[in-house]
Amino acid sequence: MIIKNEGFTIKCTGHTYITLEWNDKFIFCLDNDMTCAEEIIFEIEKRTRVDFKDIPIKGSKDDFSGLRFFNGGWKRNFWNEFPDRKEIESYMKLKNGRF
């Protein structure tokens, strides 16, 4: 269930680290060197129950350029080629060994 955002923000630093905050307090940070963008999106939506695109950004959308996707690597534009729910769920099933 996706609900309305209530105080969550995200930021991307170094075109690698995505940080989730709630009311300016750190919740967690995911490293794109170790975690594909699809999984980062999944984990943030799971934690917040808010659509990733509806979470306000601290900084700029350009900070998200160069993130690594499982499907498309670093050449994929984060916002213009944002994965849909089906692509994210398919990646998570593959990652967890469920086909």
Image: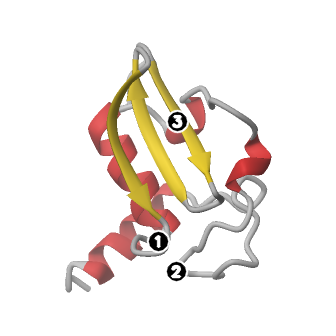
Cβ atoms at labels 1 and 2 below 8 Å apart: yes
Looking at the image, which residue is at 60% across and 50% down? 13
Q: Which mark is residue 10?
A: 3
Coloring scheme of the render? secondary structure
Looking at the image, which residue is at 63% across and 66% down? 67
Query: Image quadrant for the C terminus?
Result: bottom left
Q: Which mark is residue 71?
A: none
Q: Earlier in the sequence, mark 1 or mark 2?
A: 1
Q: Is residue 41 left or right of residue 62?
A: left
Tell me which corner region of the image, top left, top right, bottom left or bottom right, holds residue 60: top right
What residue occupies the far front of the structure in this picture?
Answer: 14
Q: CA distance from mark 1 to mark 3?
A: 16 Å
Residue behind mark 2: 70
Nearer the observer, disc 2 or disc 3?
Answer: 3
Q: Earlier in the sequence, mark 1 or mark 3?
A: 3
Closer-to-camera residue (31/83): 31
Residue behind mark 1: 36
The secondary structure type at the circle numbered 2 is loop
Q: How crowded is the residue under tag 3: few (<14 C-alpha within 10 Å), some, or many (20+)?
A: many
Q: Is residue 20 left or right of residue 76?
A: left
Q: Position of residue 39 (x, y in %)?
A: 40, 63
Q: Earlier in the sequence, mark 2 or mark 3?
A: 3
Q: CA distance from mark 1 to mark 2?
A: 6 Å
Report if residue 93 is visible in the image. yes
Q: Position of residue 33 (x, y in %)?
A: 48, 74
